[in-house]
Amino acid sequence: MVTTDVHGHILPFDYFTQLPDQPCGLARIATLVRQARDEAGAENCILLDNGDFLQGTALSDLTAQPGQGWRGRHPVLRAMNLMGYDAGTLGNHEFNFGLDWLQEALQQATFPLTCANAVTKPGARPDEDETFLPPYVILTRDLRDRAGALRRVRIGVLGLTPPQITKWDHAHLSGRLQARDMLETARAWIPVIRAAGADVIIALAHSGIEDGPERPMMENAARALSRIPGIDVICAGHSHRIFPGPDHRNTPGADIERSTLHGTPCLKPGFAGSHLGQFDLELTRVAGAWRIADYSAMLKSAADAVPSSTLIAALARAHAHTRRLTDQVLGVTTAPLHSYLALARNDPATQLINDAQRTALEAALRDTPHGELPLLSAAAPFKTGGRGGSGHYSDIAAGPLRLGNIADLYGFPNMLCGLLVTGADLRDWLERAAICFNQITPGRVSQPLFDPHVPGHHFDVIDGLSYRIDLAQPPRYDLTGTLINPKAQRIRELRHAGRLVRDQDRFIVATNTYRAWGGGPFQALAAQGAVHHGSRPIRDLIADHVAGLGTLTPQARDTWHFADLPETWAEIATGPGLRAHPQEIAALGATDLGLIDTGVLRLRVPLFSKEESTSLANPDPDDYVAPREVGAGRHLANPVRSGRKQP
């Protein structure tokens, strides 16, 4: 059995919305695990985790962190210990809080953890490296055969994490940790693990499934790993999708019915404790060793499982502590804050993040030479549907603003970074942010705007500038940051204080450490231009900013718009909660097209001026382009033109 990308979701409770009975989390998974052990015999089962378990909710990111008043054991590790995990590996988010914190936290685990490509001292070859954790573990188990006899089997577990950890958490890992390519690492260690006596080798690969060709330092390498001889089973993750599932039906080498990649059994069990992956392996003795004779693989949804009373009781104190923390009132908002249209317009919630970053960096750079340069701020929305589904949006009502609301708006423990950049850097930055939009053909109706493969958190808005995005142009870069259309220029009329930005102009930008060091398709501008590194999470800076204001009147400055595309409509998708804000739908000139079976709300919006929108309110249905079907977890929360003031 395997879990992946649990992200701190233990109890079926949402600390951001304060809603109980959530259909996910380890408390529900624990019931599925117990049922499997009852069916197969506990001695014939092993339970593994594939990484990203220590970060993601207020329980893990507030209560479990220093300075929050919690004196008990780490709640996530407490739950995993009680569930009887046999082994696990590290995801990229395990490194978010620094190596010292991670080493101390992992001492609480009663099960072994492995990671072969996180290296503290590199050798000439991967199998000569000194690694942060053991590169592999061998679980020796006495399994009961069909006749009731015990048979000793040795199960090798190899852990792998995305090599991009050294970029995403550069501030924590620089000079202390290096990362090797996952494929190079696996090819070196698999023979070693087999020589050490492993009958079966399971790769815990915190890595998604990518369609493209194999290349060095891949982030999503599960498909390439499946072609390495000696790996018997792959547990994939990282991308928060499921395998087998409709997203991978056309993936080269994928067999959805058999749950294989290039013939190797593989499962990818979603995220947040949404699914338990289960491989049933039938072993036979061959030449003195056990080998897999047959298998089946399945994903078990946690939605209908009754939460474990044992875990609920064990985490009751931590749960109560987390609720007290998140319930702290910091200020008041006079209007709702939500992310339903964060990719569709100048967004007040994103503006709040930018304002807090700018305020903090302005104070840090005061009385320094850099304090005289124009100060900008770059931020992106974090909850925009996508793989999280139709409910994955922030939705904060007017009234008290609590710490839990701030943690909802900014769900990652990033630190503040100040960058010295040029006008050319800014233009390039915005071109990379604009890859989340599809190319649009002028004069057509209801083309989907948003590329479902690009996460919404890549859409940085740089406050302090004004610019337009020309969707008739193709994206200049792809999701890896590779230049694919050198002649394309989506960013138009880039201005600062009303003046066109020149390539040689200089600015200071407040951003987060993840983006500053090249997180996503962006350049690592901090490598040459960092002028400030903060020591506190941006979430805390936002909390300070709100507390300082007391009363917040949400509004967004007039920063970005789409260039007019005459007689052109787009189809976007968002959460159904937007219907509680009809005035905002009306302000877009949008038509409500109803809900699809996944609960996503579809809107048709004009991509041209308000006056033209009024005269062409009823587009010719013969021009209609049917949108692609949106499966569970697919993201079509698409941006629309926002060429007029929003409420």
Image (tube, grey):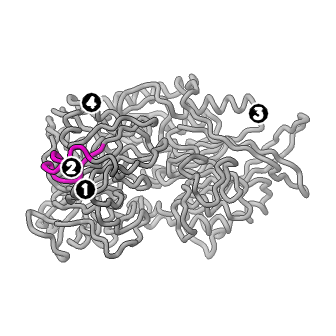
**Quick one: quadrant of the N terminus?**
top right
Amino acid carrying mark 1 in the image: Val
Q: Please indicate whether residue 100 sits to the left or right of residue 197 in the image.
A: left
Q: Residues within 10 Å of mark 4 (few under 14, many from 20)?
A: few
Q: Please indicate whether residue 507 sits to the left or right of residue 61 in the image.
A: left
Q: CA distance from mark 3 to mark 2?
A: 55 Å
**Residue position for label 1:** 461
Q: Residues within 10 Å of mark 1 (few under 14, many from 20)?
A: many
Q: Earlier in the sequence, mark 1 or mark 3?
A: 3
Q: Which residues are magenta?
A: 604-619
Q: Secondary structure at mark 1?
A: strand
Q: Nearer the viewer, residue 2 or 210?
A: 210
Q: CA distance from mark 1 to mark 3?
A: 52 Å
Of discs 1 and 2, which sits in the foreground?
Answer: 2
CB atoms at circles 1 and 2 under 8 Å apart? yes
Q: CA distance from mark 4 to mark 1?
A: 25 Å
Q: Earlier in the sequence, mark 2 or mark 4?
A: 2
**Residue position for label 4:** 580
**Residue position for label 3:** 40
Q: Earlier in the sequence, mark 3 or mark 4?
A: 3
**Residue position for label 2:** 346
Q: Is residue 343 visible?
A: yes
Q: Position of residue 238 (x, y in %)?
A: 51, 52
